[in-house]
Amino acid sequence: DTAVSQTPKYLVTQMGNDKSIKCEQNLGHDTMYWYKQDSKKFLKIMFSYNNKELIINETVPNRFSPKSPDKAHLNLHINSLELGDSAVYFCASSPRPGSSYEQYFGPGTRLTVT
Amino acid sequence: GENVEQHPSTLSVQEGDSAVIKCTYSDSASNYFPWYKQELGKRPQLIIDIRSNVGEKKDQRIAVTLNKTAKHFSLHITETQPEDSAVYFCAGKAGGGNKLTFGTGTQLKVEL
C-alpha cells in the first residue's frame, strides 16, 4: 500500500558517473516533484511535473534531467556526478491544484558521490 | 518569488513544556501555509496546515496561527513529548499552483 516509492534507497557512486533515481506514486495524483535535501536539511525544489508536463524548473544544472513517462512516474537522471550532488533526494506528489495542496513525500534516496 | 524565513534553527524544551516555531513570508499573495515534520531518517510529513482565510487552526496538541498583515505564522506544540523531537518545516504557497517554498527547518529536541 506504498503511496510514493523511490528506488534505490541508497546510491553510492564515483565522481563523473551517470545515475538514475526512479519514483512512482499510486495515489492517482496529477503533480510530482523532485526535492534535494542537503546536509543542513534545507529542502529545495528542483522540478515539478503536472500530467507529464514540466511546470517547475528551478535553477538546477543541466546535468540533472527529469523524465515523466506517465503521470504516475517521475525519474531523475544525473550526468557527470559531482561531490556537491551528495544529498538526499525526495520525490513527492500532490493532487490537482485546488483540490488539496498536501504533498506526499517518498522515503528518499541518499546519494553519496565519492 | 516567495521567500520563507524560519526561527529558531534549534529548539530544546523540557518534556511537558510548550514549543513555538515562527515563520515569515515575503509574498503577500501567499494563501496556504503547511507545517511538515521530519523524523530522523524519515520523509517529511504534513502535520497541520492553514489557509489565508483563517487566523488559527488547532489539532489536539498542535496549533498554527497566521497573521496576514504582518506576514508571519507560527506553530505551537503544547505538552511536548519525546516523540515530538524532529525537524519541523514551515512552507508557503503563492499563486494557483502547488509549488511550496520551505523554510530552513527547526530541530526540536524534547528532553526528559
Image (cartoon, helix red, strand yellow):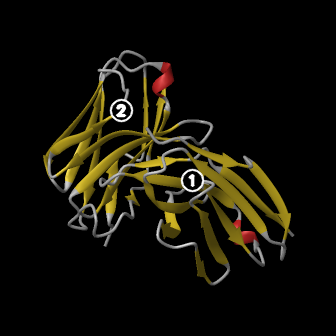
Q: Which amino acid does label 1 sit on?
A: Gly
Quarter of image, res B72: bottom right
Would you place residue A57 above or below residue A6 in this image?
Answer: above
**Is B63 on the left-hand or right-hand side of B82?**
left
| Residue displayed at 31% across by 73% down | A1
Location of residue B111 in the rendering, given as x and y in whole percent from the top left corner: 84, 65
Q: What residue type is labelled 2?
A: Glu
Residue B41 disc label: 1
* Residue lying furthest front: B69
Mark 1 chain: B
| Residue displayed at 25% across by 42% down | A75
Location of residue A15 in the rendering, given as x and y in whole percent from the top left corner: 42, 17
Residue A27 disc label: none
**Is A113 on the left-hand or right-hand side of A81?**
right
> Badge 2: how crowded within 10 Å, few (<14), some, or many (20+)?
few
Residue that mark 2 sits on: A58
Evaluate whether label 2 is on the same chain as label 1.
Answer: no
On the question of residue A114 being in view, the answer is no
Which of B109/B32 is in front?
B32
| Residue displayed at 75% across by 76% down | B78
Total numbered labels placed on residues in the image: 2
